[in-house]
Amino acid sequence: MSSLFEEIREPVAGDVPVRRVSITVNGVRRTADVEPRLLLAHLLRQGLGLTGTHTGCDTSNCGACTVLFDGKAIKSCTMLAVQADGHEVTTVEGLAGPSELHPIQEGFKDEHGLQCGFCTPGMMLAAKALLDENPNPTEDEVRWALSGNLCRCTGYQNIVKSVLWAAKKLQSQSAS
Amino acid sequence: MTQALDEIKIGGLGSSRKRVEDNRFIRGRGNYVDDIVLPGMLHMEILRSPLAHARIRSIDTSKAWEIPGVRLVLTGEMMATRNLAWMPTLSYDTQAVLATDKVRFQGQEVACVVADDPYIAKDACEAIVVDYEPLPVIVNPTQAMAEGAPLIRDDKENQHDNVVFDWQVGDKDATDRAFEQADLVSKLDLHYPRSHPSPIECCGSIADFNRATQKLTVYMTTQAPHIIRAAVALVAELPEHMIRIVSPDLGGGFGNKVPVYPGYVMSILASILTERPVKWIEDKTGNLISTGFGRDIYLHGELALRRDGKILGVRMHTTSDHGAFFSDAQPSKFKIGLMHSAFSCYDVPAAHLTARGTYTNKAPGGVAYRCSFRVTEAMFFQERMMQAAANDLGMDQAEFRRRNFVRDDDFPHRTPFGFLTDSGQYGKCLDVGLAAIGYADFLKQKEEATKHGRLLGIGISTMTEPLGAGNSREYDILGIKMFDSAELRVHMTGKAILRTGAKTQGQGHETTWAQIVAHELGIPAEDVTVEEGDTDTAPFGMGTYASRSTPVAGAAVAMVARKVRAKARKLAAHLLEVSEEDIEWELGRFYVRSSPDRGVTIQECAMAAYSNMPDGMEPGLENVAYYDPPNLTWPFGCYIATVEVDPQTGVWDVLNVVAVDDCGVRINPMIVEGQIMGGLTEAYAMASMQFITFDTQGNCIGSNYMDYLLPTAWETPGYELHEVVTPSPHHPIGAKGVGECATVGGPAAFVNAVMDAIKDTGVRNIDMPLLPDRVYEALTQRHDVSGAPPVRTDD
């Protein structure tokens, strides 16, 4: 193996342009120097270690990377980190405190809304964006709101039930 | 008086226990390969061929090396100096790791770059200059077998054409005689298109070679870590005990994560060379255009029929497109997987199958995509042939099936191609399905609708399929017998850890295996930790695919628990001061037969195993079981769909879907139903929109999720599920495989429904997916619609 090993070059310092961004992630203001081309999903995952945001397709189709951006569901694999400068981002890690669960998380567990779990964080955040706007959605409204998020395991029926379960729980919480 | 525990309360068999693994997934705390970060880790990207068939004149990597942060650039030539340019496949073929002589499909791996971050590695890939000399391209078996076709595998000695194999099974003479006696012969030709399992998580690996310990650890997306360890030992010529394969959480698999891919091999070599951990995470296009696809197979089928509806014989000829390398994972004895499981649920006196495999300039694969080794194709062909035959006979499609079913008292039954089925209630399943869909009412509704120019259709698909390879007599991969394993260690407080040779990818093993332990030992499921996927700790197993976990590893779990219970019985006898023969077992407790109030719990036995064992007894309470099943399990599925086709556009909507599954005893009904709904959705996907095709130049159409359509929550229909329970006669807890049944049986239900709706056109077949334009073509031009590649992309 030695001959090829010698072919390996030593690191060369390069001039990489960076820009300082300041983003409020899960309620905490974070500052980083990033390459302008760095994707928001990669900043969250590699830069901040928030690996609950997954990247599945790189083309905004699968929605595994869905996060809330100023409260709206967006796909973080096709947003640059610099575009998030000055904005608020919520990831799955920010749905609830360390020892508690958000009703959406409870709903997904209770109604068996996940199997491999890879699409789940994105699904839950898309669901949160829906329920924040429409606390009492119909099944069709849930299906439409989640149609930017792909799941290969469940066939969606239980995901829809999970979201409706969460809607009910959230409503009963706000009523009490 | 019994003091047995309530099985449902302790999360035993039949409990819809909530899933253990969800606790981390819903918090975003899963641990997928891409989530793992090791100190000093480098990142690898692959340069892929833009051409489907071309000779490589030269590769210039000098510009890539100049990019700051690049640590290593590998080409086929460099791999060849280490004898790693080619690797063996799981089907006794070879596959290029990095192309040396020529590229044989679009997307083939040509070079790779290892750099400080993936962005740099991608930049460097673009800086590599490859000079290609284009060659003629083959995208289907007809082209492959044509006279003067270019030879794709000119690397292989004694390969003079593009045929991978010719294989046959069944009794040709008896089948010929059956056809001579037939009143009617029903024929059907069709193509099951290339599809891709496409788990949302792509493939990836992190290879970490430690020079000091000489140990290689590979975290990777694999459904079969022990097979990978064996393959790495053979390919990389490393000692097996110095290889540790870890399969962490997997974001779905569906068969895509069984084969050994070039990226894994390159990341391993790169780590050995750089002495740093090297991470490779495939992008979606790389996944879709280069990793194991499913299907891509053509059928010519014939049924010999008696006027009264009895099937006398079956002829099938299949031609499969394996791409440039024959890399299916399948039992060595069967060239076209278990295609010959077709017609297993029907009483057919004679059958003959011939199968030819061909090389083409497409990605290698033919993996079992959510099915047991080509069973999906077998059952789709079967059920499409059944519907065509019912129509040819002018017979009701439900009645035609019922008339040919193997009857409940005819088991064990030798299938037309030689399998032995052991149990089932096929007629009952069909009846449950017909009642649920409201068959008679729907037929009336359909007739009424026809009068108003509306096109309603109903499709039925019934099948039994072989799940749970092996037994070891007949089933092996590369000579490794297809058994599986479980290891159970009960701690002194009666809590336990269970490890198996399977590997969950969403099936919920962490939840369900513990339920089997609860059933056998009375230890509450919540007291049992389940671990899988680490070859340093898990017992040897063949992994999870082909719905084999419950039939094989699940059986091993029951058997190891029984071994542990046998020892616990000795401990109980010691504690109760009676002989073993005087002891009875009830769930969670041993008691003295003559004095049932005197008993000890399993937990008390566990404590005694560490603190109060009898003289001469080996301490501890643990064991391992390797389970070699006596037969496959034979679940049955009946899937019925109703649709309405819009005659103006060819668009079809699903009205209702009913699934009746008999998968024997259900460990966790909630999880079983979840798998059935997932399977139905992949069936609907294949019937309606999901396929990968190619143009004349071998360009892959379907290389990303904008072209490769997966159904969303919006398109996906709702499902109504029913069950019939016929326990497996040989499985320790009576369970059968189920994960794939709906994917296997489902597509024909949707296609048959659409074909039923347009029956009056006389069209016999539209190839999947039944895109609106294909249905419209059939409706307006009244001819069969082929979906075989190449497709025109110039208009």
Image (cartoon, rainbow, N blue to C red):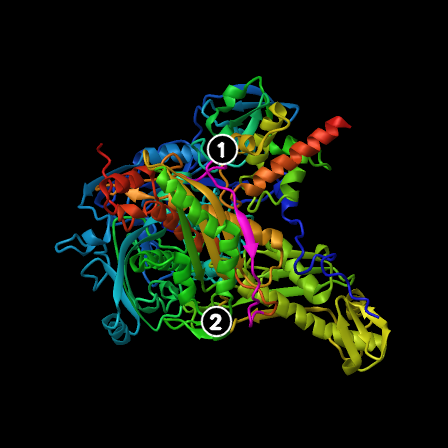
Number of other residues with Cα within 10 Å of mark 1, as a class: few under 14, some 14 to 19, many 20 or more:
many
Q: Going by the image, does B623 lie left or right of A54?
A: right
In-front residue for pair B567/B338: B338
Label 1 element class: loop
Q: Where the N terminus of chain B falls, by quadrant?
A: bottom right
Q: Residue at x 62, y 70 (%)?
A: B559
Q: Nearer the viewer, mark 1 or mark 2?
A: 1
In-front residue for pair A20/B712: B712
The image shows residue B10 at horizontal and vertical percentages of 73, 58
Asked where in the image residue A84 lies, by quadrant, the reply is top right
Q: Residue at x 40, y 40 (%)?
A: B644
Q: Residue furthest top?
A: A86
Q: Residue at x 80, y 82 (%)?
A: B579
Label 2 element class: loop
The image shows residue B68 at horizontal and vertical percentages of 41, 31
Asked where in the image residue B693 lies, by quadrant, the reply is top left
Task: Return the chain for callout 1.
Answer: A
Q: Which residue is mark 1?
A: A147
The image shows residue A159 at horizontal and vertical percentages of 57, 40
Q: Is residue B281 above or below residue B505?
A: above
